[in-house]
Image (tube, rainbow, N blue to C red):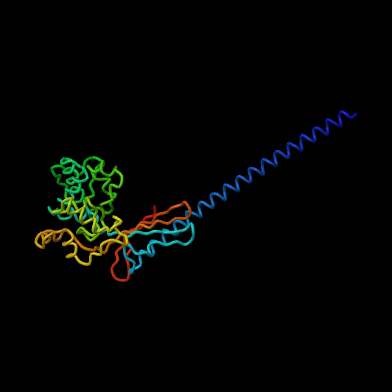
Amino acid sequence: MRRPQLARRGAALMLALWALFLLSAMVISWSLDINSRITLSGSANRQLEAEAMACSGAEVALHPAVKAGSPLLRGKFSATESYEARITGEGGRLNLNWLVAGENPARLEILRKYLEIKGVDLNERDHMIDCLLDWVDPDSLVRLNGAETDGDYKPANTLLTRIDDLKRVRGWNEWVATADWDADFTLNSTGPIDITWASREVLLSIPGMNEPRVDQFLQMRRGPDGIDGTEDDAPFKSIENVRVALGFSPEQFKQLSGLIGFKDQVLRVVSVGKSGDTTRVVQMVIRKAGNVPQLITWKEL
């Protein structure tokens, strides 16, 4: 009689152990799920906090009194939350619509020279520029090295509406496939190149510029840290100050009239927000004129 009782007890013990095992597995699974949810929630919170920090930097940069290099463009809310915004002049970039509008030879030569400096060979430069001109002009006449409607290829026959339109222009495929291909391009500046913000390549594209002159000017413009848009930048107060810094005579500088500008009111702001190891970036283009800044573009990265 004892053997059946022992068997029953053994079976009951096995069932109890099995139930305990299942319960333990459920508890572990539940714990892992909760931990995963907490981790995801924490990550989402950090992303939101980093985005909020980036937006804070952008808001500070929008204030009419805040200029490039201002210490107000850096802020810290806690040991893990901070923002750093940088203001640069949009006018230092090549406004493609301004360069091609009216097919002004002097402006087109700037684009041609820029492409040469960036390593594009002569035939490819002619092809790229003619295709771009065919894309923006209102007619269907094909230039020597250009392209008009051909099968699925249909030029807009109007000025570019956004920089990414270049990806649709024949001849620019290889260019737009490179990293930072649009770093020196814009559609938002007033037009003439603001030489107080132009990159080395853009400066070298301007008639009369050469490497020694440009490098000396950039060293002065950027200050000891060698970076544009920081507190130690040279404070050019007039276009005459720029002329002197470049080493041009008044007559030489006069020949650049219409091609260069000074302190374009259109600016680019890049604000980086951080929360722990999480980073978010806000990029915007604004026009600062008077007490009410105008937002032109906004992008979150």
Above/below status of 173 relative to 289: above
Within the image, what quadrant is residue 123 found in? Answer: top left
Residue lying at 32% horizontally and 71% vertically, measured from the top left: 291
Residue 41 position, x and y percent, is 54, 52
Q: Is residue 161 left or right of residue 79?
A: left
Above/below status of 15 relative to 242: above
Q: Residue furthest front?
A: 224
Q: Residue furthest right?
A: 1
Count of number-bearing discs: 0
Residue 290 position, x and y percent, is 29, 71
Residue 124 position, x and y percent, is 18, 41
Residue 125 position, x and y percent, is 18, 43
Q: Residue furthest bottom?
A: 291
Residue lying at 27% horizontally and 57% vertically, measured from the top left: 222
Within the image, what quadrant is residue 197 found in? Answer: bottom left
168 or 106, which lies in front?
106
Above/below status of 48 relative to 127: below
Image quadrant occupied by the N terminus: top right
